[in-house]
Image: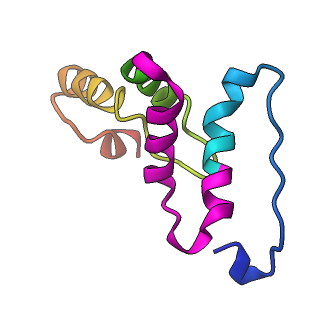
Amino acid sequence: GLTEHGIHGLTANPLEHAEASKIPLFTIADYTWNPKDYTSKDSWDASINDCTGSYTEEVTTFAENVLSSPLNQSESRTIKPIIDKFWEGFTGRNDFQEIAS
């Protein structure tokens, strides 16, 4: 929805090491190519599949665990089941939000 709010251009700031920049540059390019049909999850998955060769599974696991940001507050798909299992064993409950509040 950026273009709907008057944004007319975007910049991307690649990291010092080119390989580390491929996923974010892929997703920003995907967005700028077609913002109306852009889906962040689909673009993120496509970038990993396109950029990682035979290491897709390993990079996906790593990338999921560093995905959290102010724009994405969801927990890693890899680590969430592990955290839930820990809390269930620790407290006998599976609802971390209930425990935390």
Relative to 3, say whether 27 is above or below. Answer: above
Relative to 85, say whether 100 is above or below. Answer: below
Taking the magenta stretch, the answer to whether it contains residue 40 is yes
Expressed as whole percent of the image width and height from the top left, the position of residue 10 reads 81, 60
| Region rendered in magenta | 28-55
- Is 18 positioned to the left or the right of 9 in the image? left
Foreground pick, 66 / 22: 22
Q: How many marks?
A: 0
- Is 57 positioned to the left or the right of 10 in the image? left
Look at the magenta stretch and give its main secondary structure.
helix
- Is 70 positioned to the left or the right of 58 in the image? right
Expressed as whole percent of the image width and height from the top left, the position of residue 57 reads 36, 22
Expressed as whole percent of the image width and height from the top left, the position of residue 43 reads 50, 50
The residue at the point 22 percent across, 25 percent down is 85
Relative to 9, say whether 95 is above or below. Answer: above
The residue at the point 65 percent across, 32 percent down is 22
Taking the magenta stretch, the answer to whether it contains residue 96 is no
Residue 95 location, quadrant:
top left
Foreground pick, 71 / 35: 35
Foreground pick, 52 / 16: 52
The residue at the point 41 percent across, 46 percent down is 101
The residue at the point 53 percent across, 64 percent down is 38
Expressed as whole percent of the image width and height from the top left, the position of residue 96 reads 32, 39
Q: Quadrant of the N terminus?
A: bottom right
